[in-house]
Image (cartoon, rainbow, N blue to C red):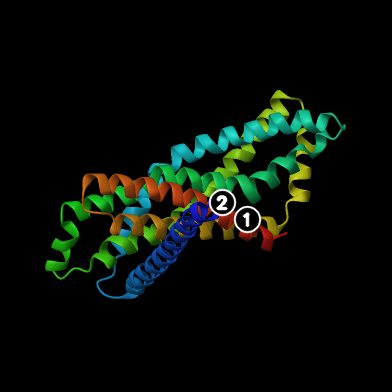
Amino acid sequence: MSQSIQQPAILTFFGRLGRWALKTIESMGDATVLSAISIKYLFARPWQGRHIIEQIYMLGVNSFIIIAITGAFTGMVLALQGYYTLARFGSESLLGSGVALAIIRELGPVLGALMMIGRAGSSITAEIGIMRVTEQLDALQMMAINPKARVILPRIIAMIIALPLLISMFDIIGLGAGYIVGVELLGVNGGAYVGEMIAKTTPMDLYAGWVKAIGFGILIGIICTYMGYRATPTTEGVAKATTHAVVIGSVGVLVLDYILTSFFL
């Protein structure tokens, strides 16, 4: 009797799990195809250079303040926490290298990407979703303007360009803030701080950070544009699409970070 009661519940669970997995794979394939088709128009006429530059300004320049604030406080917290941890072992001189490696390899790309998802990624999804609700995308097609080339392509390319630059600024600001806290506030020797930072930071560390930044830019651009383009053309549909873009993008960044980190160990 107990098996006959439990079996339908188990079958229902695996049925839902299977449908969710198939839907996820289908969505990933749809997003990949949509992005590939959009990027195909990068060098096609009419060239979208002006729209790409506009999106770089909208996504990059307008996000600088939040990136700068996050980078500054990240460097300050790392220096403060790292100092009291290293002081237990008499290794305060290693503070510079610890802050530099943590920011350049991990915290800079990851926190910068997460801030961009919240600040710029959500706006991309909402903007494209509203275009879908107000039938602006259909109007572009009626005017013989490809919406994938005009709407999706500039935002993906702009995210790929803007995010690495913003993460580089995040790193510089974070390292500077860490120096101020470590040297000026906590009394670590400035020469030792900078010397250890330069000695322990290798070109591979910088390369790893840049690869992550570019990878995150591609991921965020694809997810956010896809969610907006495929959003249900209602107010509620746009809201759900924006929420899903932020959640899926954030989880995707963390998963991709683990994958890329495993290649650079």
Residue sitting at x 61%, y 45%: 107
Q: Is residue 184 visible?
A: yes
Q: Is residue 60 visible?
A: no
Q: Which residue is mark 1?
A: 258
Answer above or below: position of 161 versus 192: below
Q: Residue furthest front?
A: 1
- Callout 1 touching callout 2 (CB < 8 Å): yes
Q: Position of residue 8 (x, y in %)?
A: 46, 56
Query: What residue is disc 2 on?
Result: 254
Using a 10 Å C-alpha cutoff, classify the residue at mark 1 as few (fewer than 14 neighbours), some (14 to 19) or many (20 or more). few
**Residue 65 placement (x, y as % from top left):** 44, 37
Which residue does the image show at 74% across and 42% down from the upper left?
Answer: 98
Q: Is residue 205 left or right of residue 27?
A: right
Q: Amino acid at mark 2?
A: Leu
Residue 175 position in % (x across, y down): 64, 40
- Residue 16 screen position, x and y as percent: 43, 57
Assign a secondary structure to mark 1.
helix
